[in-house]
């Protein structure tokens, strides 16, 4: 029985708010146990070296030291992706970045462990480090890994959807641009921490700040060579994740192994410096983008090439490589699309997934290039975008299914709120506005390891106290997943979120949920929760309908009451209904699960990019640029986000503003950059700044006012219509800033971050009559493979790979 | 291992007698020796503000204060802020306005705000931003934190009338 919404869409205090504001919430490092020992890691001072020998004898004999572990204790490697299992908890023969863990000391306290680290003697044979992707292409030897495509190329791929050269040739204008996006890091406020111990049955339990307890569970079993059933992973609430706690970390294996060997609880808390070494953040990406457009502003095709600096390990790299291309055609219709991508191993901390995973980089290029196209054609950049939007329920050239789309509404809303028409190209010199759009998946359509099981499972238990206990493996990383879970269950059962208790992130109790990544939790966990709650509601309705004098499907559950739709007066309380149902049926419980629909593309590689739904965002940024100093001030940002439905508007708004904050930081200052030490100090490749002081991020004083518009048009694939909001609103901020700077002072900064020195350099070039641009000048010769050729849906393609000459026959 | 030192200090209005390793910071003494883990650490170098507590009423970064400097002094932490079972207006406002997302920076920001409001019961938004500029938050974008502090200030002023 449909009813008006009681919980969904209402601004509420999130279910974990009280624990957070009172300091009661226990993060991983807040846990302690009797007889607990402390672990510390010895990390490599060299970016690339062979480990010749490790002597731990002095460290092991220090008073207070219980155990010293080295790579020899971990013969089995790990890797989050089955195609990139290339990392050991402690390096065995080779170190691949400054900070690569080499040995671990477990001692009675941290101080003793630190002292013991200094007593470990490691003999390294230094190898030539690879500085960046271009350097890695130039120097195939020495190889950083003995696997991969060739030399230091980790992944190399090419896809072509229709004859792209032909579409570019037939365009009235061809735009060719180079862009560079510097790497940056998640910088969660909570440093990773883990506590491992043996439970009363002798089984291993680890409480850890991980976003993905299920994947960690599998990797622990693999590395420690013990059955999964003897391991329990509890994901403690994460003090921010942003993708940085998706990969298993060496420290998690170390404390687990030590707990198994010593039979005592072992804890580790990483220092802030170590968090920078763990990294797994935004890949630095060099891009070349060729786009064809007609005189009246219709896009004809795009050829995108990307080159990723992967760092020292695979991490999520194979997926990241795909993501530097696959979502590009989701916002605008490209009749043809070609995408080549290459990820190179380098001697730096591994890059991986950070909020937007691989997509902010090409989105930056795409949206800045559109601004250049609009400028050249004399069109309004918002109009140009509106002219090329993908349609609802359509396919892209690459066979992604675009379901609902609110992008047109987003653009119209954000231009209206910002006064776009009155401002663009009309503000006084030094002030300007820029627009950009984006999209993001509501969950990756395929699991990280191949299997046919659900992506999320939820079990609900109705207790006769009236408490609704909800079990799910999903992980609260600050985004509000527990609140989403409680809200969906509460709405469906007609109760307040206050009677719902969420038991989440625990592989020992709750059904599997794949984890808090790819903005999948609201949709996948939410759909599983909805199914479980609907099943329970049906069971209870079947029992109480007779008493209520109505049919089961006419029973309404609302605001803690259960009553007949046609006769709301009498009814009963929710607790009475539970009692009646439990008396009739026994203990009341139900499960639900969710697996996303099969993607329409059938070619190899078609599994990356599909999603049950896509969110869309449009952003306008206003800037003031001081032409004497290059200083960029951002007074205000407007963001419209197509969220389908906001389950809790307070949280949804918070995710949008938080995304804008992180995007603006990336646009203006955040950079995970490296430098060479002088030769006399080893010449090693080291972090420019592994500290929060030097890694610049916005403070409260730097943050502009953000005006948020939530565009709500419920998506049928999503629970109560709710799409993702955690990643999407970050993505258009960077290009909108770049476009606003052009509007303000007429210079193009084609790389991120956009710092005052780059603005000044571009202004100087402009003054000299040179191209008013700062950005990459060249794209190297990358040995991309022959493309996998697939015909677009409108060229009689069937979603499978085909021979190129088949295209010629059709066109 | 160095011999532990023993000292007295007042924590959240109660006398505490605590012994700890002499190199420990106030942050470590609070978290490890007094089990007050509500105060968080984000850098241990005075960069992030997560460990802010009030020392004799003044906001300090407890990672930069040695435990030994606190003999006989008064420390207030997030655990001492609520009024029995009722949330302090700052805590309630952070919960209602979405000022706390992952919650890790929250105790530090709230203690900073508490110090601000004791000195300046009617701060402007700009004054709130200046006072909290040393407290990094990676989730909220700060806007709801400022909203929450503004609201709590109004609540506290209303209570004082």
Image (cartoon, rainbow, N blue to C red):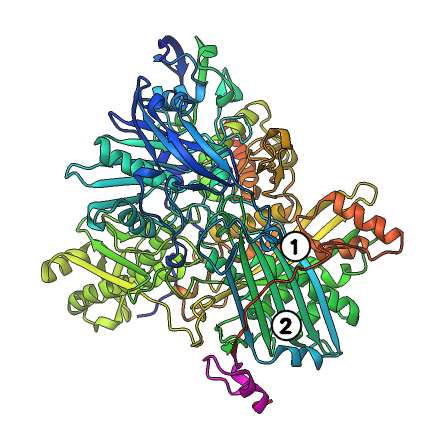
Q: Is residue A770 above or below residue A42?
A: below
| Residue with the mark numbered 1 | A180
| Residue with the mark numbered 2 | A302
Q: Position of residue A532 (x, y in %)?
A: 26, 62
| Residue A679 in sight | yes
Report in which chain the residue with disc 1 lies.
A
The number of discs equals 2
Quarter-of-image position of residue A224: top left
How many residues crowd mark 1 within 10 Å: few (<14), some (14–19), many (20+)?
many
Observer-nearest of A558 and A799: A799
Residue at (51, 49) in percent of width and height: A351
Q: Secondary structure at mark 2?
A: strand
Q: Are marks 2 and 1 on the same chain?
A: yes
* Left or right for A411, reference A603: right
Instruction: Report the Cα–Cα distance between label 2 and label 1.
Output: 18 Å
Quarter-of-image position of residue A584: bottom left
How many residues crowd mark 2 within 10 Å: few (<14), some (14–19), many (20+)?
many
Give the residues drawn in magenta, as a range: A790-809
Residue farthest along the right direction in this orientation:
A768
- In reply to whether residue B102 is colored magenta, the answer given is no
Quarter-of-image position of residue A730: bottom right
Observer-nearest of A692 and B135: A692
Q: Position of residue A259 (x, y in %)?
A: 25, 34
| Residue A31 in sight | no
């Amino acid at each position: 029985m449909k009813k008006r919404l009681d919980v969904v869409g209402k601004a509420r205090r999130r279910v974990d708010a009280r624990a957070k504001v009172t300091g009661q919430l226990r993060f991983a490092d807040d846990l302690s146990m009797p007889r607990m020992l402390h672990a510390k890691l010895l990390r490599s001072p060299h970016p690339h070296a062979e480990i010749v020998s490790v002597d731990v004898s002095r460290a092991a004999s220090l008073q207070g030291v219980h155990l010293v572990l080295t790579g020899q204790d971990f013969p089995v490697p790990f890797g989050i992706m089955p195609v990139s299992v290339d990392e050991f908890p402690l390096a065995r023969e080779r170190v691949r970045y400054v900070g690569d863990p080499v040995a671990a000391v477990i001692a009675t306290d941290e101080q003793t462990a630190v002292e013991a680290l200094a007593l470990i003697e490691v003999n390294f044979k230094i190898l030539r480090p690879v500085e960046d992707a271009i350097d890695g292409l130039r120097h195939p030897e020495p190889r950083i890994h003995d696997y991969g495509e060739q030399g230091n190329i980790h992944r190399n791929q090419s896809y072509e959807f229709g004859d792209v050269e032909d579409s570019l040739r037939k365009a009235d204008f061809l735009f060719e641009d180079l862009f560079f996006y510097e790497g940056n890091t998640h910088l969660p406020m909570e440093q990773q921490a883990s506590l491992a111990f043996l439970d009363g049955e002798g089984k291993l339990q680890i409480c850890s700040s991980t976003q993905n307890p299920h994947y960690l569970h599998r990797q622990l079993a693999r590395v420690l060579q013990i059955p999964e059933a003897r391991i329990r992973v509890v994901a403690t609430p994460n003090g921010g994740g942003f993708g940085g706690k998706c990969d298993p970390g060496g420290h998690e294996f170390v404390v687990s192994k030590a707990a198994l060997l010593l039979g005592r609880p072992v804890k580790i808390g990483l220092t802030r410096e170590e968090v920078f070494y763990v990294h797994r953040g935004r890949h630095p990406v060099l891009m070349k983008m060729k786009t064809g457009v007609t005189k009246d502003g219709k896009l004809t095709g795009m050829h995108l090439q990307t080159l990723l600096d992967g760092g020292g390990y695979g991490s999520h790299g194979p997926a990241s490589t795909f993501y530097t291309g696959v979502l590009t055609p989701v916002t605008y219709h490209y009749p043809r699309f070609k995408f080549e991508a290459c990820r190179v191993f380098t001697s730096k901390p591994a890059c991986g997934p950070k909020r937007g995973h691989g997509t902010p980089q090409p989105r930056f290029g795409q949206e800045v290039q559109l601004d250049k196209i609009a400028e050249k054609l004399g069109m309004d950049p918002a109009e140009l975008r509106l002219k090329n939007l993908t349609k609802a329920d359509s396919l892209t050239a690459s066979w992604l299914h675009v379901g609902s789309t609110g992008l047109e509404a987003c653009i119209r809303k954000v231009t209206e709120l910002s006064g776009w028409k009155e401002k663009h190209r009309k503000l006084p010199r030094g002030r300007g506005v820029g627009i950009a759009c984006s999209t993001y998946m509501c969950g990756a359509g395929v699991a990280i390891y191949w299997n046919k099981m659900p992506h999320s499972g939820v079990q609900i238990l109705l207790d006769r106290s009236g408490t609704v206990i909800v079990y799910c493996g999903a992980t609260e990383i600050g985004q509000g997943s527990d609140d989403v879970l409680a809200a969906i269950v509460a709405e469906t059962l007609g109760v307040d979120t206050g009677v719902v208790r969420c038991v989440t992130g625990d592989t020992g109790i709750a059904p599997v949920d794949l984890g808090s990544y790819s903005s999948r939790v609201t949709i996948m966990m939410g759909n599983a929760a909805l199914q479980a709650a609907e099943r329970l509601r049906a069971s209870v309705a079947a029992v109480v309908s007779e008493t209520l004098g109505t049919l089961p499907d006419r029973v309404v559950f609302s605001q803690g009451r259960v009553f007949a739709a046609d006769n709301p007066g009498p009814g009963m309380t929710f607790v009475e209904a539970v009692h009646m149902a439990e008396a009739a049926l026994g203990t009341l419980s139900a499960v639900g699960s969710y697996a996303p629909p099969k993607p329409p593309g059938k070619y190899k590689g078609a599994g990356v990019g599909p999603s049950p739904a896509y969110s869309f965002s449009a952003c306008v940024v206003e800037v003031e640029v001081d032409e004497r100093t290059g200083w960029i001030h951002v007074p205000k940002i407007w963001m419209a986000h197509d969220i389908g439905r906001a389950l809790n508007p307070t949280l949804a708004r918070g995710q949008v503003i938080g995304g804008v904050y992180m995007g603006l930081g990336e646009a203006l200052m955040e950079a995970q950059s490296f430098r060479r030490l002088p030769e006399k100090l080893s010449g090693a490749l080291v972090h420019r700044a592994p500290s929060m002081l030097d890694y610049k991020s916005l403070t409260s004083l730097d943050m502009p006012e953000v005006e948020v518009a939530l565009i709500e048009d419920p998506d049928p694939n999503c629970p109560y219509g709710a799409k993702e909001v955690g990643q999407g609103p970050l993505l258009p901020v960077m290009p909108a800033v770049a476009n606003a700077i052009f509007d303000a002072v007429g210079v193009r900064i084609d790389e991120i971050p956009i710092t005052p020195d780059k603005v000044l350099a571009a202004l100087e070039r402009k003054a000299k009559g040179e191209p008013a641009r700062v950005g990459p000048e060249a794209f190297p010769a990358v040995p991309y493979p022959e493309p996998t050729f697939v015909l677009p849906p409108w060229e009689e393609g069937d979603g499978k790979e085909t021979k190129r000459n088949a295209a010629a026959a059709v066109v | 291992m160095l011999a532990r030192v023993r000292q007295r200090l007042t924590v959240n209005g109660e006398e505490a007698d605590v012994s700890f390793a002499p190199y420990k910071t106030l942050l470590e003494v609070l978290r490890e020796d007094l089990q007050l883990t509500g105060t968080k650490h984000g850098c241990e170098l005075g960069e992030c503000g997560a460990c802010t507590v009030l020392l004799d009423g003044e906001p300090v970064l407890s990672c930069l204060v040695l435990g030994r400097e606190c003999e006989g002094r008064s420390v207030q932490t997030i655990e001492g802020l609520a009024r029995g079972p009722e949330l302090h207006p700052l805590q309630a406002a952070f919960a209602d306005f979405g000022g706390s997302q992952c919650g890790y920076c929250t105790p530090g920001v709230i203690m900073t705000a508490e110090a601000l409001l004791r000195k300046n019961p009617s701060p402007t938004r700009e004054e709130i931003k200046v006072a909290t500029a040393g407290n990094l938050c990676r989730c909220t974008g700060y806007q709801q934190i400022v909203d929450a502090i503004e609201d709590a200030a109004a609540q506290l002023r209303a209570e004082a009338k």
